[in-house]
Image (spheres, rainbow, N blue to C red):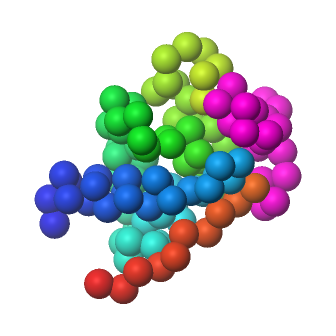
Amino acid sequence: MSNDNFFERVYAIARQIPYGKVTSYGAIAKALGTARSARMVGWAMNASHNLEDVPAHRVVNRKGLLTGKLHFDGTNLMQQLLENEGIEVVDNQIVDFEKHFWQPEVRIE
């Protein structure tokens, strides 16, 4: 599978993340049937910042840390976008991560 195709599949899942919810790189990788490709999901998110319809700010690491924040314009843009959706962030960590976590559906292809 080409990176372009993989990235598009990642974006299709990211677009489904509900407002006020977050998911993890690993959860997206599992949903795609490529559980060991969480890092590739991260690369896809980093490459998505010119795509307005991909809510990359809603994808965090498995512990709820805003590990992708350096790829957003401005120092705290990722945090601000999450806080605008009612998600509290303290020290780059989502508060009540489990409450805000959204599990993508696993698709078998």
Which of the 4 image quarters holds residue 86?
top right
Q: Which residue occupies 61% across, 69% down?
A: 103
Q: Is residue 8 above or below residue 92?
A: below
Q: Where does the image place residue 92, in percent across and percent down from the top left? A: 72, 33
Residue shown at 38%/77% (left/top)?
33
Decide if residue 18 is on the left or right side of residue 72. Answer: right
Residue 29 on image: x %, y %: 43, 65
| Residue 62 horizontal side relative to residue 2, left or right | right
Does residue 93 show up? no
Quarter of the figure that contains the C terminus:
bottom left
**Whole-percent x and y of residue 18?**
62, 56
Number of disc labels: 0
- Outermost residue to the top: 74
**Magenta-tinted stretch:** 80-99
Depth order, front residue of 81/94: 81
- Please indicate, yes or no, whether residue 28 appears anywhere in the rendered image: yes
- Which of 88/52 is in front? 52
Q: Is residue 87 magenta?
A: yes
Q: Position of residue 56 (x, y in %)?
A: 49, 41
- Residue, x 34% and y 46% (percent of image)? 44
On the image, which quarter does residue 90 sit in?
top right
Residue displayed at 60% across by 15% down: 75
Name above or below for residue 103 compared with residue 73: below
In this view, 85 is above or below 77 = below
Quadrant of the image containing the N terminus: bottom left
> Hey, which residue is sitting farthest left in the picture?
2
Magenta segment includes 84: yes
